[in-house]
Image (tube, rainbow, N blue to C red):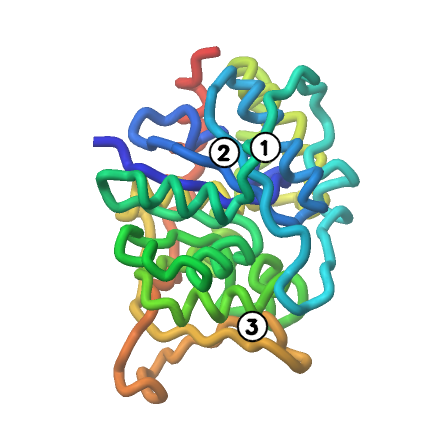
Amino acid sequence: MAIKILMDTDPGIDDAAALTMAINDPKIDLQLITTVAGNVTVDKTTKNALKIVRFFNQDIPVAAGAQLPLFKDFEDAARIHGESGMPGYDFPQDLPTPLHKTAVEALHDTIMASSDPITLVPTGSYTNIALLLSEYPEVKSHIDRIVAMGGALGMGNMTSAAEFNVFTDPDAAAIVYKSGVPIVMVGLDVTMKALLTNENIEKLQSLNEAGQMLHDIIINDGDHSDQGSAMHDVNTIFYLLHPEAFTTRDMWIDVVTDGPAIGETVGDIRGAYHNGKTNAKVSVDIDAQAFNDWFMAEVSAIKM
């Protein structure tokens, strides 16, 4: 049976790649896409999500969400993802229309209408998810788990302490981690190890139309390096399908919400401060070769 998921996202180059995998893998049942301000403003992230849905000629509903973090000033990542958030490819312009519901309303309605528990996959800031859990606590028992891209036990990518998604709205992240819903943290500790290699990035353009699209946006990644590009958000889908490629540790995660370490995810690695309780399964290592092999196989199998 396919894994039912809802993706809350801020496309974004790697978000677009994650959506590509979620849309096309038959073992994933993507029922709803909601958008949030993050890599770029929410009007742009919504348009980018619609571009991906239209590119693959799918009928997946898209709902626009939070324009701003709960309390913190908004700071985007256009320096990495470009002004549009998804530069480099000429997408179709005849885009579908987003739902008239808000992201939170759409998340609530989809979760409560599902006959089975559903998995939430946030790959942007967690503002929509925090609002959902706060405004509609009844959804918690209908959520199987949250598989979230974000956080780091080691060095961040916004400050030496903080990863971008959590830094963007640390108050929302704190609500999510305190919610009691099972959480898998897929953070920089694994995403910075599983770089899509430059060799594979070049191969993408010869695979098919989807590979050409992914190649053209990935080469515009402002964080691209001599070793390759970090496909941060794609690791959530990889985890759902291949958890055996990850090493995880159960621990308690606290989120710093003010001061110079704002946005830091602090793991109680000794189990010393929460009476041995844990609130997250934290990804600490990954099979980078398996990730690359899977990524290329997934794109190769896409039929347009």
The answer to whether 257 is drawn above or below residue 223 in the figure is: below
Q: CA distance from mark 3 to mark 1?
A: 28 Å
**Residue pictured at 51% horizontal, 65% vertical:** 173
Q: Amino acid at mark 2?
A: Leu
Q: CA distance from mark 2 to mark 3?
A: 26 Å
Residue 247, percent from left and from top: 32, 58
Q: What is the total number of numbered labels drawn onto the structure image?
A: 3
Q: Which mark is residue 264?
A: 3
Q: Nearer the viewer, residue 239 or 259?
A: 259
CB within 8 Å, label 2 to label 3: no
* Amino acid type indicated by mark 3: Glu
* Image x and y of residue 80, in percent: 72, 47
User: Closer to the N terminus: mark 1 or mark 2?
Assistant: 2
For the N terminus, the image quarter is top left
| In this rendering, position of residue 175 left or right of residue 261 | left
Q: Residue furthest top?
A: 304
Q: Position of residue 124 (x, y in %)?
A: 56, 50
Give the residue displayed 56% in from the left and 70% down from the top.
171
Can residue 82 be seen at all in this image of the molecule?
yes
Dot 1: element: helix
Residue beneath disc 1: 49
Residue shown at 43% from the left, 12% from the top: 303
**Marks 2 and 1: in contact by CB < 8 Å?**
yes
Query: Label 1 crowding class (10 Å Cα cut-off): few <14, some 14-19, many 20+?
Result: many
Q: CA distance from mark 1 to mark 2?
A: 8 Å
Badge 3 or badge 1: first in the primary sequence: 1
Q: Which residue is mark 2?
A: 19
Mark 3 Cα shell of 10 Å, populated few (<14), some (14-19), many (≥20): many
